[in-house]
Amino acid sequence: MKISGRVEGVEYAIRDIVESARQVKARGVRMHYLNIGDPCQFGFQPPPNVLRAFADAVQGGRNQYADSEGLPELREAIAAREAAKGMDVTGDGVLVTNGVSEGLDMVVSSIVDPGDEVLLPGPYYPPYASYVRLRGGVPVEFAADAGDGAPDPAEIRSLITPRTVAICLINPNNPTGTVIGGRRLRQILDVAGEHGLYVICDEIYDRITYGGPFEGAGSVARDLPVILLNGFSKVHMMTGWRLGYIAFNGSPGLGRIREHLPKLARVRICGSTPAQHAALESLRGPQDHITSMVSELQKRRDLAVRLLSEIPGITCRAPAGAFYAFPRIDPSLGTDKEFVSGLLEETGVLAVHGSGFGERHGSGHFRIVFLPPEEYLEEALGLVARYVNRSTR
């Protein structure tokens, strides 16, 4: 029976490799999972007040459909959060989604026609390219890290054609951990403004950084059209509750998409009502648990980068944000797919091949998460070292 050629080409490397891992596990191999960026899988959990808010919503009978755009009080709280980062946004410029992925799908569906081009930071989170292709568009990569820890506005300008409709930024970047500072953000937004392009900025890791204060795209946008994607999975440790949001700044250029995109929210009804009540508490309540998580993650980052850098044939820079390392492998160790496959088969360590994040800038790398406790990381990365040492004999 026929299927769409577009859906046949959809890939999601982070989860596509799990079937291979199941086969290895079935042979009795002890697994070490370093593939999925899920804080909850490694002991990080929402604080008690947020858990109570979820339970109270369920037990209190707040299980009905919410407004398609989201609970009004949550939309206002989200707007306040983003306004505190400098974005020109109010509650009516926020739309609550079932995770950032649904928000991305809605945005791409609203702006991409067959043949349109969308500029993506390579390497990029895989759904960006998948959703663009699914709508008949063409993903075009620019370097997420041009050597100084940020994309090059001149490269971005050189890739723009009459078919380009948007520039996407992931800040901090997944998978590299690159953080774009305010000055460079302003330069990129100026390029978008010169060509009348949307800027889609994913800031899901905005409070997980290991250097100076984070500067969001909204803080430097002025009247340029910025569509912000953010959510509660990572910073607020609510991965399985699937809640995110789209926020539009006050640019007049966003008038038509603000009018029409909410139709897609109505088609899918609404986001989880109990989860929205919990998200509201997560914004209004104490934030100490976030600071504690980031402090702990920095220790794990430093350990992971040190252990990886000690392995011959592997080089790894310390990421400035998020919770991923993206080491480069020497060509003598094979392609990134061969390396990750061999590592899994021989050791049970599950990483993600870098080309799954874009062939142009991801090939020759692999991605791991450094979310696990230090002893877990030491054991897993010790297996990586032994695998490399055997491979180079």
Image (cartoon, rainbow, N blue to C red):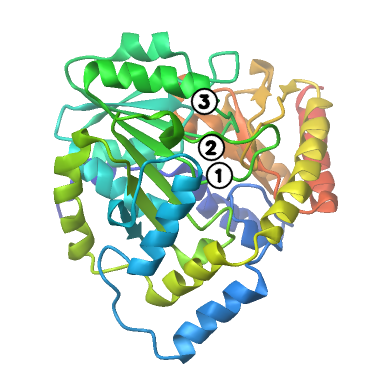
Camera-near label (1 vs 3) is 3
Q: Residues within 10 Å of mark 1 (few under 14, many from 20)?
A: many
For label 3, the SS is helix
The residue under label 1 is 205
Q: Is residue 238 left or right of residue 311?
A: left
Classify 57 as above or below 291: below
Q: Nearer the viewer, residue 104 or 82?
A: 82
Nearer the N terminus, badge 2 or badge 3?
2
Q: Which residue position is annotated with label 3?
A: 182
The picture places residue 65, in percent across and down from the top left corner, at 28, 78
Residue 291 screen position, x and y as percent: 71, 52
Counting residues from the start of the chain, the first of labels 2 and 1 encountered is 2
- Which one is closest to the eye, mark 2 or mark 3? 3
Any part of residue 98 in sight: no
Q: Nearer the viewer, mark 2 or mark 1?
A: 1
Q: Are marks 2 and 1 in contact (CB under 8 Å)?
A: yes
Residue 237 occupies which quadrant of the picture?
A: bottom right
Helix, strand or loop at disc 1?
Answer: loop
Instruction: Judge by depth and name the residue closer to the eye, 284 or 370.
Output: 284
Residue in view at x 30 percent, y 28 percent: 224
Q: Alpha carbon of mark 2 to alpha carbon of mark 1: how far?
A: 9 Å
